[in-house]
């Protein structure tokens, strides 16, 4: 007769943040790391894509208004790509108008800047739990 032992490993969520504000990227990285998240940052679409070639984050935070790019279009591209479509994406913007119609681009949620860490973390946890449940249903 064997004994089944379940071990729950508490792993940090991996977050990738795309924003063209160096100050915001640094602040987000510090705050999330203090709360046991692993954070990578990208100031441009090309650096985001380079990150995605070497690792898959658990969630993406993408600013809508980027220098030379549109975060909503980037979101749509990622959601149409088989290797990245499963990653939850939260769009960020300082303009509520820019966040309208976010679902049409495949985004899973939105956050208006400025934001409180607790509000962002609630949305991240909700999406990570939802995504984890989807994986368990597919696998199980």
Image (cartoon, rainbow, N blue to C red):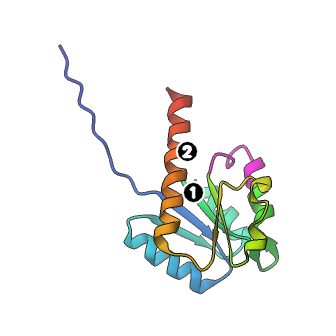
Gap between marks 1 and 2 measured at Cα: 10 Å
Q: Splitting the image into 4 quarters, where does residue 38 fall?
A: bottom left
- Residue 98, image x and y in percent? 78, 71
- Residue 3, image x and y in percent? 19, 22
Q: Are marks 1 and 2 in contact (CB under 8 Å)?
A: yes
The label on residue 74 is none
Q: Which residue is mark 2?
A: 131
Q: Return the residue nearer the eye: 22 or 126.
A: 126
Q: Residue at x 82, y 77 (%)?
A: 68
Give SS at disc 1.
strand
* Residue furthest bottom in the image: 23
Up-down relation of residue 123 to residue 3 (above or below)? below
Q: Is residue 134 left or right of residue 67?
A: left
Q: Is residue 85 left or right of residue 58?
A: right
The label on residue 59 is 1
Any magenta on residue 82? yes
The local crowd at label 1, few if under 14, some if 14 to 19, many if 20 or more residues have their Cα within 10 Å, is many
Region rendered in magenta: 78-87
Q: Residue at x 64, y 45 (%)?
A: 86
Q: Is residue 76 left or right of residue 24?
A: right
- Residue 69, image x and y in percent? 80, 72
Up-down relation of residue 11 to residue 60 (above or below)? above
Q: Return the residue nearer the eye: 55 or 7.
A: 7
Give SS at disc 2.
helix
């Amino acid at each position: 007769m064997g004994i089944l032992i379940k071990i729950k490993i508490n792993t940090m969520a991996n977050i990738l943040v795309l924003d063209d504000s160096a100050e915001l990227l640094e602040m987000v990285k510090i705050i999330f790391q203090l709360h046991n998240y692993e954070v990578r940052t990208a100031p441009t679409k090309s650096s985001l894509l380079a990150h995605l070639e070497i690792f898959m984050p658990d969630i993406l935070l993408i600013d809508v208004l980027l220098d030379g790019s549109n975060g909503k279009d980037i979101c749509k591209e990622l959601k149409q790509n088989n290797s990245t479509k499963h990653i939850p994406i939260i769009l960020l913007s300082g303009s509520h108008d820019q966040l309208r119609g976010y679902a049409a681009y495949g985004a899973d949620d939105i956050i208006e800047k400025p934001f409180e860490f607790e509000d962002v973390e609630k949305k991240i946890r909700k999406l990570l739990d939802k995504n984890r449940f989807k994986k368990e249903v597919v696998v199980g």
